[in-house]
Image (tube, grey):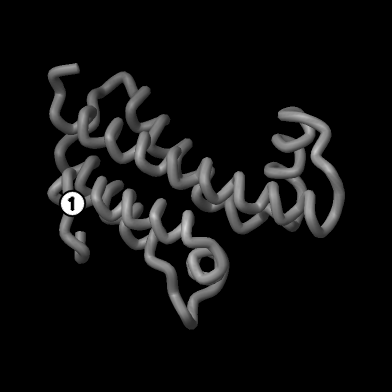
Amino acid sequence: MADPAAQRLTTLRNGLLRLHKHLLDLERAAYERDVARIQGPGHLLDLLLNDPWFAWLRELSQFVVLVDETLDLDEPATAADADRLIGEARRLISPGENADGFARRYREAMQRDAGAVLAHRDMMNVFAALGSKHGD
């Protein structure tokens, strides 16, 4: 893959997927502890798509899909496309004390799980490697 914008978006996507997997594993464990055992990958997918317990993760899931769709367009992504999506991802992955939705739940996840803090650090390293600035 020689296209720099596509390379940057692929790096972004892969970092977001690793973060998503960690957060999903964290929520799965909490769900199984507090609600019921998950009966396999199909059941987990159904919960991720439909259960309010997992609703906060949908924003991140949908963003990964947006990056995938951008990579799959007939016209190659431009540097501006990559910069815009990296900036949007940075804003999404900003845990907020007074925020709602994903940002609030993400902050709560980091407060209760050291692995979530490490996953966040790894995502910040991805952003640094992409050369993205906080205000993109």
Asked which quadrant contains residue 120, the reply is bottom left
What type is the residue that disc 1 sits on?
A: Ala
- Determine the residue positioned at 38% across, 65% down: 94
Q: Report whether 43 appears left or right of 118.
A: right
Residue farthest along the front direction in this orientation? 114
Question: How many numbered callouts?
Answer: 1
**30 with respect to 118 (left or right):** right
Percent position (x, y) of residue 30?
71, 56
In the rendered view, does 133 fall on the left or right side of 124? left
29 in relation to 136, above or below: above
In the rendered image, residue 9, in percent from the top left (x then y), is placed at: 27, 35
Tell me where residue 87 appears, x and y as whole percent: 26, 55
> Element type at marker 1?
helix
Q: Residues within 10 Å of mark 1 (few under 14, many from 20)?
A: few
Q: Which residue is label 1 attached to?
A: 128
Q: Which residue sits at x=18%, y=33%?
A: 5
Residue 33 figure quarter: bottom right
At x 23% / y 31%, what residue is drawn? 77
Q: Considering depth in this image, is 4 or 116 the residue closer to the camera?
A: 116
Quarter of the picture containing the N terminus is top left
Identify whether 21 is placed above or below 60. above
User: In the picture, residue 75 is in which quadrant?
Assistant: top left
x and y, in percent, of residue 23 in the image: 55, 50
Look at 77% across and 30% down and name the residue there.
Answer: 40
